[in-house]
Amino acid sequence: MDKRYQDQVVMITGAASGFGKMAAERFRDEGAKLALSDVSGDALRAVADALRASGTEVVADVVDVSQEAQVAAHVANAVSAFGTINVGVNNAGIGHDLAPLHLLPVEQFDQNYAVNARGVFLCMQQQLPHMLKAGQGVILNVSSAAGLTGASQLSAYAAAKHAVVGLTKAAADEYARKNIRVNAICPAFTVTPMVEEMAEQVSTRAGLSREQALGHIASRIPMGRVAQPEEIVQAMLWACAPENSFMTGQAIALDGGLTA
Ligand code: NAI
């Protein structure tokens, strides 16, 4: 039986770590060719080398997703190597210092919005012309449970992730008749370097151990635990899969009941 993504060109941003890195491995397992990018060059090269060693075709570029010219150059590289982009997983993102809104430095708001919201907009803007040309395409934007509900001490992040849901729904509506599906996933706390960093901040401020800090974060989730990356990444592959052909414009919560 054919693999689900056999010879599909899958572009993943933020591919050097966390969800992006694991998604690259899973799409590889299912037959995809990969266009990978990240702002962190060394880590990206290590991921790309390992994937190439397993026989996969990979284009890897150092890209800051908030910079239009860099995103455009990466998409052009990928299309020149592979001919098109079938699936865009716009995953790159950053957190910010935990702080009440009235104390959050404006620079952190701007930086967070630039990467998390503008970055998704720029990636879609570059991916869509190729999908329109091909008469098909799938985009999956990585938002957050904080894109569906409030998130104490994370106001800029919540604002940017709500924007990702808005961009997703607008694009889904605009391109549905062109056979392009656009969805978002909205995970809650998952053990990746991003949440390790948050646990570090909680542990330093509250004088807790790493485990206690993760326990404190998990206590906000009705299921009483944080997620493992596999639980999120399997949903990424499901959301983009060819058999999932009638789902578009959705912001899918993967959050242990946080937004229930
Ligand atoms: P991570 O920190 O492990 O990975 C994020 C990757 O994005 C890193 O490799 C980083 O270098 C890259 N990146 C950061 N800024 C960039 C930029 N300007 N241009 C290109 N690449 C950039 O974090 P994780 O958890 O894998 O996050 C992936 C996505 O999932 C993010 O959008 C995040 O907001 C979202 N998310 C994560 C959750 C979690 O609990 N881990 C929960 C909800 C959403």
Image: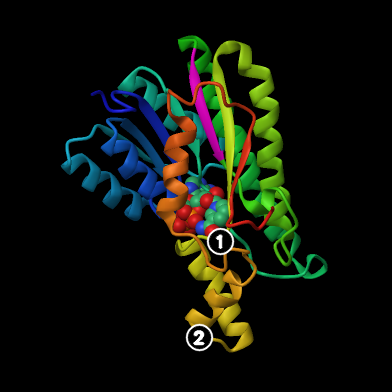
Asked whether mark 1 and ligand 1 are closer than 8 Å, the reply comes as: yes
Q: Amino acid at mark 1?
A: Phe
Q: Is residue 138 magenta?
A: yes
Residue for point 67% across, 69% down? 98
Q: Nearer the viewer, residue 70 or 174?
A: 174
Magenta-drawn segment: 136-141
As drawn, is 8 to the left or to the right of 202?
Answer: left
Q: Nearer the viewer, residue 76 or 49?
A: 49
Residue 175, horizontal then vertical, whole percent: 62, 17
- Quadrant containing the N terminus is top left
As drawn, is 98 to the left or to the right of 183?
Answer: right
Residue 156, horizontal then vertical, whole percent: 72, 56
Q: Secondary structure at mark 2?
A: loop
Q: Amino acid at mark 2?
A: Ser
Residue 72, horizontal then vertical, whole percent: 50, 29
Residue for point 67% across, 55% down? 157
Write down the residue under mark 1: 189
